[in-house]
């Protein structure tokens, strides 16, 4: 099987959403997700109150900024920022990474993974993780943007304001996440690399943890597993409409601002929802943001261990799917 080469391609407009040309060779051809399987959410004010209090009482809960230079993109993948729009007509900027060498891969149709960003918006860390996962597992990765083009808070006050603004309308929040999933499904390259729409995954960090857990709670079609890294754990909506079929993995800091009770409540939620496969892993002597190399809270040993756990879980899922 030949390797992937990237060259410019033309853009398409399908279903009212724009697809976009990517100079290094990606194209977006939008696929329609199946109808949602739940009613419109009812906001859970307690979550927002607890989350706001948690952030307000820990002025540097995410750690002070740490210098981090984005490593070179691995040689077996190609990466590019993508401007896109959603049904709300607003402009967003995501980041796509695709395999460029299919040698050794079982199929040019690859599993897709959506990356949810922290409360400071899509940045260097999410781009790094997208490239890391795409390179190691041969996934097509797409880091979404729920804030909008150019909205990248530079301090915790601004980040809190942007996050609260998005969470003030949960229907719109969910629509922005779904839009990101549509663009993941649409990511292709001229060499034939496409997303296997029946094999979807999602990783989220901090605020992104909320995004991926909401994907699981809303039973996003063909979502195989989600992994949350120091994500906020409280449920945004009434659990009566939740139906979780995806495998759920949560990586939690022992010193997280949410406290130990948040993790216990999340575990109770998994039990109450009769989730078939779920796990929580607590990491000692680390604080919120410990897998984020742009944060002073970053702890490489634990961050590598957490991602190795995630890699192993995703590989196990893919192996079990191939055996069926």
Image (cartoon, helix red, strand yellow):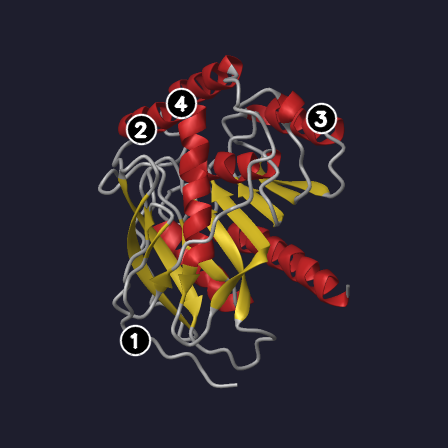
Q: Residue 182 in the image: x percent, y percent?
A: 44, 49
What residue is disc 4 on? 169
Q: Dot 2: few (<14), some (14–19), or many (≥20) neighbours within 10 Å?
A: many
Q: Nearest to the eye among marks 2 and 4: give it.
A: 4
User: Residue at point 52% right, 14% down?
Assistant: 46
Between disc 3 and disc 1, whose residue precedes?
1
For marks 2 and 1, give the one nearer the viewer: 1
Q: Which label was assigned to residue 268?
A: 3
CA gap, disc 4 and disc 1: 40 Å
The part of the image, by quadrant, that contains residue 146 is top left
User: Does residue 24 appear to the left or right of 290 in the view shown?
Assistant: left
Neighbour tally class for label 3: few under 14, some 14-19, many 20 plus, Cα within 10 Å: few
Q: Could you say which disc has been placed on residue 162 in the image?
A: 2
Observer able to see residue 287: no
Residue 64 spot, x, y in % from top left: 33, 37
Which of the numbered marks, if any, corresponds to residue 142?
none
Q: In this view, does 94 lie to the left or right of 149?
A: right
Asked if the residue at tag 2 contacts the one at tag 3, i.e. Cβ–Cβ closer than 8 Å, the answer is: no
Q: Quadrant of the C terminus?
A: bottom right
The one nearer the camera, 267 or 194, is 194
Between the residue at mark 3 and the residue at mark 1, the CA separation in whole angstroms equals 50 Å
Residue named by callout 1: 7
From the image, state whether disc 3 or disc 1 is nearer to you: 1
Between residue 192 and residue 117, name the one nearer to us.
192
N-term-proximal mark, 2 vs 4: 2
Answer few, some or many: residues within 10 Å of disc 4's Cα (few below 14, many 20 plus, some between 14 and 19).
Answer: few
Task: Kindly indicate whether the residue at mark 1 contacts the one at mark 4 (C-beta within 8 angstroms).
Answer: no
Disc 2 secondary structure class? helix
Question: In the orientation shown, which residue stands out farthest toward the front?
Answer: 15
Task: Give how far apart the Cα atoms at labels 2 and 1 are.
Answer: 36 Å
The answer to whether the residue labelled 2 contacts the one labelled 1, judged by CB atoms less than 8 Å apart, is no
């Amino acid at each position: 099987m030949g390797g992937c080469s990237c060259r410019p391609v033309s853009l398409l407009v399908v279903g009212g959403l724009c697809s976009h040309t990517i100079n290094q060779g990606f194209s977006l051809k939008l696929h329609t997700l199946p109808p949602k399987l739940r009613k419109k959410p009812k906001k859970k004010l307690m979550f927002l109150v607890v989350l706001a209090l948690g952030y307000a009482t820990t002025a540097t809960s995410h750690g002070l900024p740490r210098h981090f230079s984005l490593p070179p993109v691995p040689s077996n993948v190609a990466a590019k920022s993508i401007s896109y729009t959603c049904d709300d007509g607003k402009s967003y900027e995501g980041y796509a990474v695709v395999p460029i060498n299919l040698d050794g891969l079982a199929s040019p149709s690859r599993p897709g993974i959506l990356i949810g960003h922290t409360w400071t918006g899509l940045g260097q860390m999410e781009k790094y993780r997208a490239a890391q996962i795409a390179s190691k597992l041969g996934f097509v990765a797409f880091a979404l943007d729920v804030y909008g083009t150019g909205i990248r808070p530079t301090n915790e006050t601004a980040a809190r304001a942007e996050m609260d603004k998005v969470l003030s309308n949960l229907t719109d929040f969910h629509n922005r996440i779904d839009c990101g999933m549509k663009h993941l499904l649409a990511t292709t390259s001229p060499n034939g690399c496409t997303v296997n729409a029946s094999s979807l995954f999602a990783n989220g960090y901090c605020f992104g943890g909320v995004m991926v857990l909401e994907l699981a709670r809303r039973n996003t079609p063909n979502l195989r597993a989600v992994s949350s890294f120091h994500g906020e754990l409280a449920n945004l909506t009434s659990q009566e409409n939740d139906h979780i079929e995806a495998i759920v993995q949560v990586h939690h800091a022992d010193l997280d601002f949410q406290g130990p009770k948040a993790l216990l409540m999340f575990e109770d939620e998994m039990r109450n929802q009769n989730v078939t496969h779920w796990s929580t892993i607590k990491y000692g002597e680390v604080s919120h943001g410990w897998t984020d190399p742009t944060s002073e809270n970053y702890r490489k040993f634990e961050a590598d261990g957490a991602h190795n756990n995630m890699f192993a879980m995703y590989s196990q899922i893919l192996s079990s799917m191939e055996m069926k």
